[in-house]
Image (tube, grey):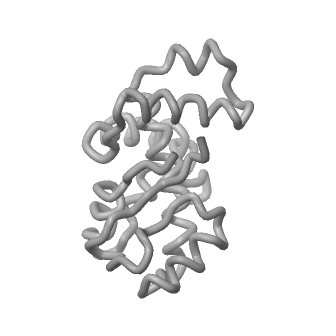
Amino acid sequence: MELNVTKTIHAWLDDESWSDASNYSCSRLEAGDYAGPGSWQAACDDAGDLIKLSPNETAATRDWFGEFGAWDDSERAAWTAKEVAALLLQFIAGDWRELVEPEPPTNYAEFEQATQDCGGRLSPESDSDIFTGPWFYDIGT
């Protein structure tokens, strides 16, 4: 399933430094001991504005997280829709940072190659303008 994450990516593209994603995905080297709790809190605070999932997309995303083996069925079942969106936001942010740091691609062809180099989950629509066109996140279900 491909999720439309255009709103999220455009919010980051609108930021001159393209660095807003680091609020949701960062390391202890970057943010110290607060990296985990701080990025989770930021994702929970902002997921409602940046990630819009239908009930079916929320269920599919929750199932997709089950493939990682980090959470059992009962843990995932207890997640609210907001928590699913927040965790998804963290994944998208990590992939975005892989795409644009340290040097961002400047056109569709460069973005397409970069997305393949970092797993291929996040990508702009084929031949679209990366700044105005739609973006998608493939959760593979």
In the rendered image, is residue 65 in sight? Answer: yes
Residue 130 x/y as whole percent = 36, 76
Q: Which residue is drawn at 54% across and 52% down?
A: 138
Quick one: which residue is furthest to the right in this view?
69
State the image quarter where residue 48 is shown.
top left
Measured along the vertical axis of the image, is residue 47 above or below residue 82?
A: below
Q: Which residue is drawn at 49% across and 20% down?
A: 79
Measured along the vertical axis of the image, is residue 27 above or below residue 62?
A: below
* Image quadrant containing the C terminus: top right
Residue 139 x/y as whole percent = 56, 46
Measured along the vertical axis of the image, is residue 75 above or below residue 69?
A: above
Q: Which residue is drawn at 40% across and 41% down?
A: 43
What is the count of numbered marks?
0
Decide which of 54, 97 is in the foreground and name it.
54
In the rendered image, is residue 31 in sight? Answer: no
Q: Which residue is drawn at 42% across and 87% down?
A: 106
Residue 93 x/y as whole percent = 47, 55
Measured along the vertical axis of the image, is residue 92 above or below residue 37?
A: below
